[in-house]
Image (cartoon, rainbow, N blue to C red):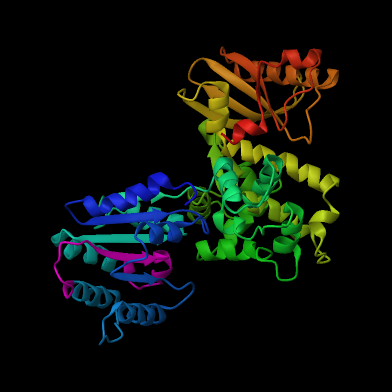
């Protein structure tokens, strides 16, 4: 198993607990939650069930009955309510021998089971509090890609399920190091630069990486999975958001707006761009997108909380807008046709910035301040009478009285800092200091793929981070 060692160990340790355990495993769609759980429990469950996307309550209950029969319950009526369904499940578990072994119940895609007016959460609450906690041998594992549902209805539940989880596991996407290990385990034969480029489109989603076929270059694989007539990920965008949110129209509108601004937008700017109403539903959509990891919210140095910026962070979504949606003529070789174009270079620059934001711990380690707390964000100021407008790719605002002003450059070789570029970087530093009034020391930092061409202007750079550091 690539990565996931801590999560795997946490699940295996459940067998050693003297009490019943209630565990939630959640994270982005296709991140490997189900695979992790099945591997940790060696595919052996006393009962397992998977919710059905878009099904009615009666269809969900019918399928729950089928899962009970598959688990060994010979005579089982179709339950009329979720309370009845969980009562049948509890009696089935009670019929098993009391042999001292844990009884493992795994319910996958649990959020899909909570249909309108089904009282599902209340029934789950009663099943755990009224039955499972009266025993010491139950391991109840719930799982789902609708991260916001699990957070709002289970983790942050203020009713009967409040503080009832004994463990929660948020499964993060792979980082670059783990994707490199995946490529090596599957003998894909890719260089570090090729893995980075693939990561900029696929992110750290194991399911997406599973379509990268041995013997094909990254370019060949991209044409096959994104742009061929039946490409495995050519229609993933619609499926991704519709499977996570019951009413995804607002979520998709927000994503569309954020895709146009790599630095992100403030709340008011999103409202203006989407023409959505400023109400609780809009706030909920923003929060849910953030909980699911598609966007991030940050407050830049020198800005007020109400000036917080929302930024698109999902690699596949960025790739979809920059490439897949641009393939209007259905060219099956759209990627290779544009690999040397300005379309590719523009996407690569933006995507590499996202990858760096996703690997701030690795950047901190490379710069030697892993233990120091810092706030990571982009920064910009508008032109006024004193200075021109300025944008900074990444600011690491550290608690040790230091700021790393990071310039991020994606390049196929060593990056050359010219006289003009050197002046622009110094002006950005001066603008940051003047606009924020910071008294901290400011270190100019370059994050590049292969480092810098050695020239007099390279000596003005205080710190360097390369692609190789991101893989550590």
Quick check: 165 left or right of 413?
Answer: left
Q: Quadrant of residue 379?
A: top right
- The number of numbered badges drawn on the structure is 0
Q: Quadrant of residue 154?
A: bottom left
Q: Position of residue 114 (x, y in %)?
A: 39, 69
Q: Position of residue 167 (x, y in %)?
A: 30, 49
Residue 273 appears in view: no
Indicate the quadrant containing the C terminus: top left, top right, bottom left or bottom right: top right
**Residue 113 is inside the magenta segment:** yes
Instruction: Depth check: give the residue in front, 465 or 298.
Output: 465
Q: Quadrant of residue 223?
A: bottom right
Residue for point 65% across, 53% down: 317
Residue 81 appears in view: yes
Residues in magenta, as a range: 94-121
Residue 306 vertical position relative to residue 43 in the rendered view, above or below: above
Residue for point 35% across, 77% down: 67
């Amino acid at each position: 198993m690539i990565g996931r060692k801590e999560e795997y160990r946490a699940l295996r340790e459940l067998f050693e607990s003297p009490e019943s355990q209630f565990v939630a495993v959640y994270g982005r769609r296709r991140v490997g939650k189900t695979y992790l759980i099945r591997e940790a429990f060696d595919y052996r469950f006393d009962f397992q069930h998977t919710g059905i996307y878009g099904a009615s309550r009666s269809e969900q209950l019918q399928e729950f009955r089928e899962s009970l029969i598959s688990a060994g319950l010979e005579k089982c009526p179709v339950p009329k309510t979720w309370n009845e369904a969980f009562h049948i499940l509890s009696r089935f578990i009670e019929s098993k021998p009391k042999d001292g072994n844990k009884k493992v119940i795994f319910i996958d895609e649990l959020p899909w089971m909570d249909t309108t007016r089904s009282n599902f959460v209340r029934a789950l609450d009663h099943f755990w509090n009224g039955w499972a906690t009266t025993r010491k041998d139950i391991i109840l594992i719930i799982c789902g890609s609708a991260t916001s549902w699990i957070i709002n209805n289970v983790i942050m539940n203020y009713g009967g399920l409040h503080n009832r989880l004994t463990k929660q596991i948020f499964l993060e996407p792979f980082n670059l190091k783990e994707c490199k290990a995946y490529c090596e385990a599957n003998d894909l034969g890719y260089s570090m630069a090729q893995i980075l480029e693939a990561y900029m489109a696929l992110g750290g989603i194991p399911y997406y990486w599973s379509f990268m076929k041995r013997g094909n270059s990254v370019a060949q694989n991209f044409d096959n999975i994104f742009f061929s007539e039946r490409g495995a990920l050519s229609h993933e965008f619609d499926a991704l958001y519709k499977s996570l949110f019951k009413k995804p129209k607002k979520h998709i509108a927000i994503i569309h707006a954020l895709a146009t601004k790599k630095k992100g937008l403030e709340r008011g700017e999103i409202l203006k761009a989407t023409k959505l109403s400023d109400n609780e539903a809009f706030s909920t959509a923003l929060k849910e997108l953030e909980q699911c990891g598609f966007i991030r919210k940050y407050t830049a140095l020198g800005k007020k909380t109400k000036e917080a910026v929302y930024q698109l962070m999902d690699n596949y979504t960025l790739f979809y807008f920059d490439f897949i949606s641009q393939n209007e003529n259905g060219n099956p070789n759209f990627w290779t046709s544009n690999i040397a174009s300005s379309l590719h270079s523009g996407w690569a620059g933006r995507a590499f910035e996202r990858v760096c934001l996703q690997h701030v711990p690795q950047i901190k380690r490379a710069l030697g301040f892993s233990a120091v707390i810092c706030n990571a964000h982009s920064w910009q100021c508008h032109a006024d009478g004193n200075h021109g407008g300025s944008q900074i790719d990444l600011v690491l605002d550290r608690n040790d009285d230091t700021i790393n002003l990071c310039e991020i450059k994606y390049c196929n070789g060593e990056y050359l800092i010219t006289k003009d570029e050197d002046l622009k970087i110094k002006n950005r530093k001066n603008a940051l200091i003047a606009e924020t009034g910071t008294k901290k020391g400011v270190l100019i930092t370059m994050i590049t793929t292969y480092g810098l061409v050695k020239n007099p202007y390279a000596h003005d750079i205080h710190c360097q981070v390369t692609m190789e550091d991101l893989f550590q």
